[in-house]
Amino acid sequence: MAGRGQPWTSFVADEAGARQLHEDGNPAHRLRVEHDRNVLLIHLSDEDGKGWTVLAVDRTSRAWAVAQGRVQRATAAAAYDELRGT
């Protein structure tokens, strides 16, 4: 949470229809959300963009799993596999 007196900021898109957002003023800090009928994947890069935290959420039960790593795709797969117990 932002401290008292500190303003909140937002993640923004560079262009209309962009699939990825970035922190306003810090384009290396990125955010992306993707989903299918069963799972939401929330990808959040490190502040410097050199690593990833991915949250996988089951859309029905709201069970979740988190993975961290250097490669976005591998990190997403790890979070998904953890969620599914594989």
Image (tube, rainbow, N blue to C red):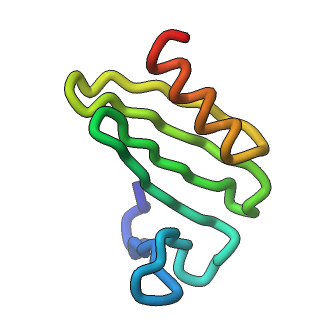
Tell me if 46 is positioned left or right of 25 in this view. right
Whether residue 50 is situated above or below residue 39 in the rendered picture: below
**Quadrant (top left, top right, bottom left, bottom right) of the N terminus:** bottom left
**Would you identify the image quadrant in which residue 74 lies?**
top right
Residue placed furthest toward the left: 60
Foreground residue among 1 and 43: 43
Whether residue 21 is situated above or below residue 62 in the rendered picture: below
Foreground residue among 6 and 58: 58
Q: Residue 24 at what x, y percent from top left?
A: 53, 80
**Would you identify the image quadrant in which residue 10 lies?**
bottom left
Residue placed furthest toward the bottom: 15
Write the residue at 54% across / 73% down. 23
Write the residue at 20% across / 27% down. 60
Residue placed furthest toward the front: 37
Write the residue at 48% across / 89% down. 15
Q: Residue 2 at what x, y percent from top left?
A: 42, 61
Q: What number of labels is visible?
A: 0
**Quadrant (top left, top right, bottom left, bottom right) of the C terminus:** top right
Q: Residue 20 at what x, y percent from top left?
A: 52, 69
Whether residue 6 is situated above or below residue 49 in the rendered picture: below
Tell me if 74 is positioned left or right of 34 in this view. right
Foreground residue among 5 and 19: 19
Write the residue at 75% across / 63% down. 48
Tell me if 71 is positioned left or right of 38 in this view. right
